[in-house]
Amino acid sequence: MLVRVLLGTLLILSLLLAGPGWVIASGQVDLRARWAGADRSPAGLAPDPASTPEAVVQVYAARALAWRGAFGVHPWVAVKERGAERFTVYEVIGWRVYRGSSGVVVSARDPDGRWFGTAPTVIAELRGAEAEAAIPKIAAAAERYPYADQYRVWPGPNSNTFLAWIGREVPELRLDLPSTALGKDYLGAMPIARAPSGTGWQISLFGLFGVLVALEEGVEVNLLGMTFGLDPLDGALKLPGIGRVGLWSAEAKER
């Protein structure tokens, strides 16, 4: 019996670590990357406020620094009100919590700035009237974030927990966070909540075990904080570390 348990445990760990291991082996993350001197320049994904008077909301995610990037991403949301000259960025930064401050950071940094060397991707966007309506809701949701004084890389609450909270509070975003958004399923003491997209529901035990079913995300299983899933609408598998793998749809969303 003990041997079976050990073999089962090893099999589960192998499944969970295969994706991150492949990401490292394929060179998708730089294990030697350091905070100091890392590239934070814009990736060219955000519209120029000078030539874009309409309101804009963009949600970004980029691989985390060094080995952490094999497992997860760091996300943020950037907003620009109609006629504004610059973007405002909302995100959670863990080291601020460790120093006794709120982890929620509101800044005017480059909205599409590289996350310490890693270029981000856009995972959600609103423009015009939809963005105008969503921007004050995003600001209010960031202010109400219940874990501003807590941060754990795994299983949460962390920066992905924050974006999942924003998504639930602002369902207009239809936020489909990637499977690499470790911490997105952390719900605290409440085991049931709406999916981050607002198009379904999820059950999660402290971000470690759970199930999510939603129109936007599809079906996801959370095992030790890592996500396996199937998104029928976009024709994609969701795998730990790897993210989305397109199946029958050539237009599967990249994460």
Image (cartoon, rainbow, N blue to C red):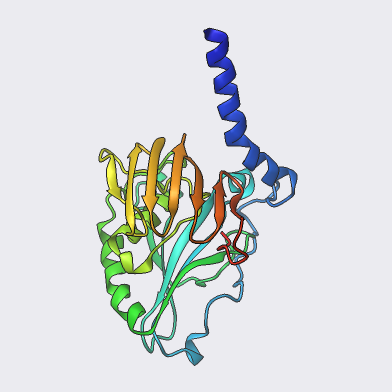
Where is residue 203? Give x, y as percent: 32, 41
| 54 to 149, vertically: above or below | below
User: How many numbered marks appear?
Assistant: 0
Quadrant, the C terminus: bottom right
Residue 233 visible in image: yes
**Horizontal side, residue 182 vs residue 83: left or right:** right
Name the residue furthest right: 26
Where is residue 13? Give x, y as percent: 58, 29
Residue at x-position 74% and y-position 50%: 27
Where is residue 34? Give x, y as percent: 64, 51
Residue 93 visible in image: no
Residue at x-position 55% and y-position 21%: 8
Residue at x-position 44% and y-position 59%: 176
**Horizontal side, residue 60 vs residue 82: left or right:** right
State the image quarter where residue 172 is shown: bottom left
| 2 to 69, vertically: above or below | above
Where is residue 61? Give x, y as percent: 52, 60
191 vs 87, nearest the viewer: 191
Name the residue furthest front: 248
**Horizontal side, residue 150 vs residue 13: left or right:** left
251 vs 106, nearest the viewer: 251
Residue at x-position 70% and y-position 52%: 28
| 58 to 210, vertically: above or below | below
215 vs 34, nearest the viewer: 215
